Structure formats: C-alpha cells, structure tokens
Amino acid sequence: MKGIIFNMFNDIVVSRFDEQTWEEILGHARVDGAYTSLGNYDDHDMFALVGAAGHHMGMTPQECLQWLGREMLPRLGGIYPGMLERFQNTFSMLKALNNVIHPEVVRFHPDAIVPVFHYYEVGTDSMVMEYCSARGICSFAHGLMQGCSDYFNETVGIDHTQCRHRGDERCLFHITT
C-alpha cells in the first residue's frame, strides 16, 4: 500500500482527534509508524492500523475502512490537483474510475494496485457497480463513494447489496440519485 494512504490516515486521525490518539493507534496496531509518502508498505500494516483505529472509535474494521474512505476522498483532490474538478457529479466520477482516475493514480504511483469496477444497469439515476480486487477492501471503496457524494453535495443512496465478506461471490453496490 502506498505511503500516501498512510499519511492521509495519520492526517485524518490527527485532525478528527489528536496526535496522542494516532500514537495510541500505532501502539495498539504494533506497527512502526515511520511512514513516508513515497514508501510502499505491506497491506498487513494498514489492516493492523484499521483494526486498532476501529477499536478506538468503537467500529468494526469494515466500518473503519468505510469511514476512512469517506474522509479520504476530499483529500485526494489536494494530492492530485484537478482530478476531482473535472467531474460534474458523483455518477460522472464513479463512471470514470477505470479509465480516468485509476490511470492517473498509476501514472503518479506506477506500483499502485488499483481495483477494477464493472458497471451494470447504468441509467441516469441508478447503476450497479461491481468491485473487483484481491485486497478485499470494498468497505473502503464504499466510503470513497460516500465521500464523492459529499464532495458534490449530492444525496446518493449506496447499497452494498452483495459482499464477499458476507459470503457472496462478489461485491456489488447499487447506487441511486
């Protein structure tokens, strides 16, 4: 996982709580915490941090991943200037993940592992998105979708109808405006 994600995680916790809380989370996660934005770190560290942060906030790891994704989306605009501004609404941004946003991320971070989304039943006010990734952090993707809705100040329904963590074959989101 890219160090930039770790740095944003740190920034989010410190801005929502304080530096002491971040230090406590690092201690409970039993990870070093000396991350740089240019580094590439094992996903195990991220899952340990998510578990410790979730415990601290009274959330499950999946709820914490969703919270983190939602909090992280607006910060991505600062890291990748112009990326969010090119879209008019949540749907236009979500439809551009595979062909616009992820290639941009890979351009800046060639070793980044990005998920793939498949789109079904795409209409003007609803669509079904399938999340495909070996990482299995569909809750993080869910949070990014919510953050996108927040960014565009839209009311968007996001229903995680199927999930591999619940025993389903795949992860599907039904999204409506």
Image (cartoon, grey):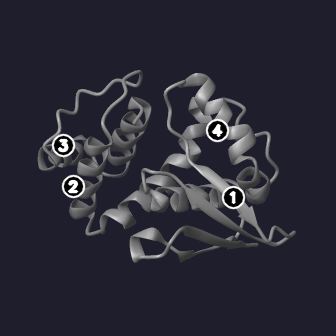
Q: Nearer the viewer, residue 157 or 41?
A: 41
> Residue at 30% across / 68% down in the picture?
59
Q: Earlier in the sequence, mark 1 or mark 4?
A: 4
Distance (Cα) linking label 4 and label 2: 28 Å
Reading the image, the residue beneath label 4 is: 102
> Residue at 61% across / 70% down in the picture?
173
Residue pushed farthest right?
124
Distance (Cα) linking label 1 and label 2: 32 Å
- The reply to whether discs 3 and 1 touch (Cβ–Cβ < 8 Å) is no
Where residue 26 sits, quadrant-wise, is top left
- The reply to whether discs 3 and 4 touch (Cβ–Cβ < 8 Å) is no
Q: Residues within 10 Å of mark 4 (few under 14, many from 20)?
A: some
Q: Amino acid at mark 3?
A: Leu
Q: Amino acid at mark 4?
A: His
Residue pushed farthest front?
169
Q: Secondary structure at mark 3?
A: helix
Reading the image, the residue beneath label 1 is: 118
Asked whether, in this view, residue 101 is left or right of residue 65, the answer is: right
Mark number, residue 52? 2
Q: Secondary structure at mark 4?
A: helix
Reading the image, the residue beneath label 3 is: 26
Q: Earlier in the sequence, mark 4 or mark 2?
A: 2
Q: Is residue 35 above or below residue 114?
A: above
Distance (Cα) linking label 3 and label 4: 29 Å
Distance (Cα) linking label 3 and label 1: 35 Å
> Residue at 40% across / 58% down in the picture?
65
Q: Position of residue 121 (x, y in %)?
A: 79, 71
Q: Quadrant of the C terminus?
A: bottom right
> Residue at 54% across / 24% down in the picture?
110
